[in-house]
Structure formats: C-alpha cells, structure tokens
Amino acid sequence: MDPDQILRIVDSLHRDKNIDTEIVFRAIESAFASAARRQYGDTSEVIVTVSRENGSLAATLDGEPLDPAEMIGRIGAQMAKQVIIQKIREAERDSLVEEYHELEDQIVNGSVQRVENSLVTVQLSSVEAILPRSEQIPGESHHSGERIRAMVCEVRPQGTRVKVVLSRSRPRFVQRLFEQEIPEISEGVISINALSREPGYRSKVAVSSTDSRVDCVGACVGVRGNRIRSIVDELNSERIDIVRWDEDPEIMIPNALQPAEVDQVLLCDMIGRAIVLVREDQLSLAIGRRGQNVRLASKLCGWDIEIMTAEELDEQIDRAVTGYSALDGVDENLAGALVEQGYLSYDDLSVIEPDALAEMGGLTMEEVDHIVEQAETRAEEAEAAALEARERQKAQAAADAEAAAQQALVEASQPTEGSEETAEESAENDSEATEEVSDASVDTPAAEDSVEDAAEQAPAVAEEEAEQAEEEAVVEESNEEVTETTEEESAEADEQAGNE
C-alpha cells in the first residue's frame, strides 16, 4: 500500500469520524499482521509497523526482516481491508460511546425520527437514540419531525453500534431545565438543594441563594412567571412548586407542604418521622390529591411525614399507650417513652433497634426480643383483622348494590302493573256504566215520554225564536234610520250657523 495513501486514510478518518490517529495506525498494523499470518501460518510471529511520519510499512517474520510487498498477496489484501474496516467501525463506536458518556445526565436536542408502539426514535447529531415509553412524560405524545429535548440517561455499545437511551421523566431532567432557563443557577448564585417529582403531575424544587440580595424563589419564577412558564410548557403543563430550602426540618417541612398551612411539626428522630399538625380545613390540602403533596414533601425533606389534626394525634397517643401497656414487659413509663419517640403502632415496634429499646426501658435483650415478638404477633393479627374487615365491607357493598338493583327493577315494574290494573278497572267501570245507561234507557218509561215531549215541543220553540229574531232586526233598522236622520239635521244646523 502506498505510504501517502495510508497517511491520507488516517487523516480522513481522524477528521470525519473523530477517531484518534493512533487507533487507525494500530488497526492497519493489526490488519497487515493478520494477512501475513494467513500466508505464512498462524504459528508464525509477524510484526508489522507503520511509520507515523511518512506512512511506510516495516515487517518482521520470526525476527527476520520481511518485504511488505511479498507478505501480502491478493487474498491477504482483501483480508487486510476487511480487518481495517472492522477495526475502524469499532473505533468509531468507541469514540461515540466516549462522546455520549460525557453527555450523560445532560440535555440534548434532536428530532423525532419515527414512533413505533410508543417507542420514540430520536435523531441526534451523530447517532440515533431511543426514548422508551417508561422514560416519557405520562400523557404526552410525539410525532415525526418534532423537535424534542431529552436527557441522556444511558450509553452502551451494542455490536458495532451505540445504544443511547433518553429520558424526560427523571427528576434530573427538571433540574437540567432549571439550569438552562435560569442563569442564576448556572452561575452558582442559586442552587437546587433537593427535588422530588411525579412526572406529568407535579414537582417540588427546593432552592437556596448564596447572595442575600437575590431572592431564590422570585428569580426562579421570573417576571410574571415567564421563566417557570417555559419550563412548565416543556414538561407538558406539569405543575411545579418552588420552595425555599432550610437546614432546619421544622422550617423546611412547612415550606415543603405549601400551599397548606402548618400549625406544628413534631420530629421523631429515632425513626425519621415527622408528625405535622394542621387544622381540619387544611387537612385535605396538606395531604393533596391521592396523597401527592405529602408524598412529594416527604421525598423533598427526607422525612416520613404524617399529616393529622391535634384531635387525631391525641386519639392515636391514647390508643398507643393502651396497646403498649397491654404487652408483657412494658410498663406505663416505657409506653409513654415509646409514644414520645413517635412509635404509635405495633408495626413501629417491629422495626425498632433492640439496643434503643433496651436503653429506653432498662431491659435485657431477652426481654426486648419478647416484647418485639409480641408486637409483631399483634401487628399481624391487626393486619388480618383489617383485611377481613375490608373483605366484609366489600361483600356488604356488593350485597347492597345488588339489593339496590333488585329494588330498582321492582320499582320499575310496579307502575306498569298498577297502570294495567287501573286500566282494567276503568274499562270494567265504563262497561258497567254503559250497561247501567242502557238498562236505564230500556227500563225507564218516563225517560221515553220526556224524550217524545221534547221532540214535539222543539218545532214550536224554533218558530218563537225566529219571530223574536225578526222583531229585533226591525227594531235595529228603525234605530239606524233615526240615527241617520239625526246626523243630517245636525249637519244642516251647522251650515245655517256658518251662513249667519
């Protein structure tokens, strides 16, 4: 092979494929050595070197110099070509893997190539990446040609190709969007201390500022909310709560539970639990829809938060003290100490550290094991009873629903039957009335006589009415004539008065 051609190949691959020149030189040397071993035997020791300066070949066979033109025949040249292509593809793949490894947890821009069975293929600058359904925001859809932003979450070689997996549902994606949209975060003035997210629904972001003159929450929201609005639009209208970070859990937990108002926070350090007391009207707001608000706040603060009112806390304390006192080996003082540390159920005792319980009550390890065993047994019994109660409630609900359905059918059928009976009764009554009338017409002679008399008197009455009508007509005509005469006389009188 021409040395100048070798140098041109190396330089072209370095510029076009971003492959290190040393990798290309080694690939060429390995290809020529493989081709020579095929010609001289696999057991022969062939060493081929390519000059990095001028591209010339030098080879040795079992320590003896070998003419490069003689070591490669036509078949060897084809084999060398295949080996070079394979090595270059592997080098290109390794280069891409290294490039995208540096982009892990970073946002990249691409365009949707195709969508197949909810799997989105995204064309990046130099590789095709995939956005699985599990890494998409629930409720969003994509179409071919759409511009998309996503975070690189996984990069691994796959044969001669590179598999790049993107994500839009991870909490880190929200953090990267904040860093891109809010300059104070990228500059280090504002820092994101914690973040919790349920993709597609809600996110909570805790921020703090290193400069007292910069309001961390206001800077993230922006003027009229323009900064946070761009992030919300990118996240398919996902709700974002920005809260002020504080190292003190008694301050941070109320901030995390916003917009609910908190009355008091009780910290139970031994089990990492925080009991938050709120008013009755703030209870549903603090818990959130399906427990979403308290769940995100727990992740944000790192505490197991329980929301309750003061009355509910008093009831649980009384129930816990009574239950613990019933255990063999637990006196009232130990029961009160357990409740003060936030252990409010038998399940809590099943996870308590034996050393801590022994220290609290001055107990031996055997007594501690005995108490914990009792607590676990009662917890299982309580769970079984609760399960049985739920099953019984479901069965009762099903029975009530079935009874209601049957009652509805009965009520739907009753009006029809009643109307039919009423119609039948009315028909019978009508027939009876008809029979009575017919019987009366047949059996009553007086009725027949009255009918005949009325028939005879009818012509006479008609004649009298006709005569009266004629007389009234004559009277009306005479009145009209009198009226006309009066009008003419009044007209003449007016004319005479005018002449005078």
Image (cartoon, rainbow, N blue to C red):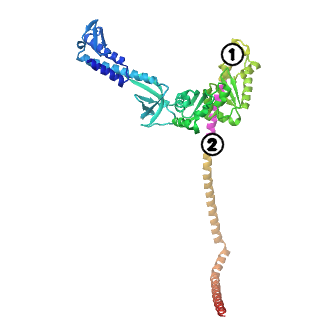
User: Residue 318: x and y, percent?
Assistant: 74, 26
Task: Judge by depth and name the residue closer to the eye, 478 or 145.
Answer: 145
Residue 386 part of the magenta-drawn span: yes
User: Residue 56: x and y, percent?
Assistant: 28, 15
Residue 191 part of the magenta-drawn span: no
Residue at 63% across / 58% down in the picture? 425
Task: Judge by depth and name the residue closer to the eye, 37 or 313.
Answer: 37
Instruction: Inspect the image, locate mark 2, and give the three-letter code of the amino acid beneath it.
Output: Ala
Instruction: Inspect the image, locate mark 1, and give the three-letter code of the amino acid beneath it.
Output: Ala
Residue 337 seen in the figure: yes
Residue 158 seen in the figure: no
- Look at mark 2 in the image and give the residue it sits on: 404
Q: Residues within 10 Å of mark 2 (few under 14, many from 20)?
A: few
Query: What secondary structure is found at the residue carrying circle 1?
Result: helix
Residue at 61% across / 43% down in the picture? 406
- Look at mark 1 in the image and give the residue it sits on: 356
Dot label at residue 371: none
Position of the N terminus by quadrant: top left
Q: Which residues are magenta?
A: 381-406
